[in-house]
Image: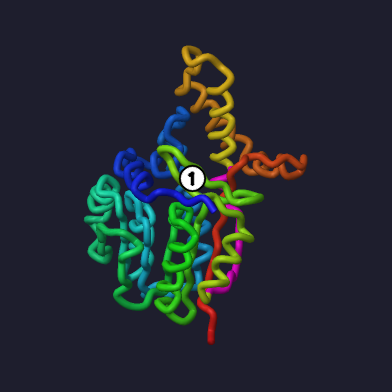
Amino acid sequence: MTEIDYKTVNRYWEAATPSILGPYMMDGFGFPASAGNFRFQAESRIVRRLAGGVKRDGAVLDLGSGIGFWAEDFARRFSRVTAVEGSRTLFESLQKRCSPYPNITPIHGDVMTFEPDGLYNLVFLGGLLMYLNEGDVIALLRKLAPCIEPGGMILCRESTVRGDTVTRQGDYQVIYRSVPNYEHIFGQCGLSVRHVERNEPYVLMQIGCELVRKWKETVPEKFHVLRGVGHLTYFGLRLCNPWITHIPKALGISFPKLENHFLVLEADVS
């Protein structure tokens, strides 16, 4: 199985733009910043529903925190949040965003060497596992499984493919796995999958990304006018939401190529 190179992954994220669009991989499509905010707010509502049974006075571990939007959201609802981010560039933005919240502990460090400091009611992995080779995914989850409070959960939000695993090389390296592949991995880690749900806000915006990418591949660069095309695409998607995300499936078309799923995990009771 092809593996990704962590030095290349780290180099990419050190150079990433610390914005709402950058970590969402929505840069370069001409979208307004409101597109990133829309997606985050829509995803946040899903996360609040999925984690609705988690104790409000509980502790949260946010691994791969990025610029801190999720850590900030969790801090408003839970007593204690530990946010771990490896990129110095993104960590500086995380610190700034989370500075008004005394219940957030930001940590700059590698998620693989981070040692949990107690038990957590919620562990959030918001697009982390796809940047880890399979052996490290298993090692990380086996380390986290004993740290879940009774009644707590690990909540993953991962980009997925429908078929075989896809490994991207080059400057941006990532591993896209299928939901059944993730379920198989979780089973090796002492974790049970309680719930799987397609991330519809992600799918909506991914439709836009892939449409704009096709435009860029088809039209000469001097006619790209990305700002105009990106804005029109975004507002068209909002106008047609949510039914537009169901059309490809109804027509039997595998579009967009990338999906994203929320996976709710709980520790097996031995």
Name the dominant secondary structure of the magenta segment: strand
Magenta run includes residue 98: no
The residue lying toward the viewer, choosing from 20 and 22, is 22
Q: Rate crowding at label 1 as few (under 14), some (14 to 19) or many (20 or more) other CA atoms within 10 Å.
A: some
Residue shown at the point (53%, 46%) measured from the top left: 167
Q: Secondary structure at mark 1?
A: helix
Residue nearest the observer in this picture, 269 or 262: 269
Pinpoint residue 77: horizontal percent, then vertical percent.
Answer: 38, 65
**Residue 96 image offset from top left, x and y in percent:** 23, 50
Q: Viewer-proximal residue, 186 or 207?
A: 186
Amino acid type, label 1: Arg
- From this view, report whether residue 149 is shown above or below residue 14: below
Which residue is painted at 47% across and 63% down in the image? 135
Q: Per the image, is 196 magenta?
A: yes
Mark 1, residue position: 39
Drawn side of residue 118 relative to residue 234, left or right:
left
Residue 90: % across, % down = 29, 47
Coloring scheme of the render? rainbow
Q: Residue at x 53, y 70 (%)?
A: 265
Asked if residue 23 lies left or right of residue 39, the reply is: left
Instruction: Find the residue positioned furthest to the right.
Output: 251
Q: How many marks?
A: 1
Judged from this view, the residue extending furthest toward the front is 1
The residue depicted at 29 percent of the width and 75 percent of the height is 117
Residue 181 pos. (x, y %): 60, 60
Q: Quadrant of residue 89?
A: top left
Q: Quadrant of residue 203?
A: top right
Q: Viewer-proximal residue, 163 or 237?
A: 163
Magenta part of the chain? 191-203
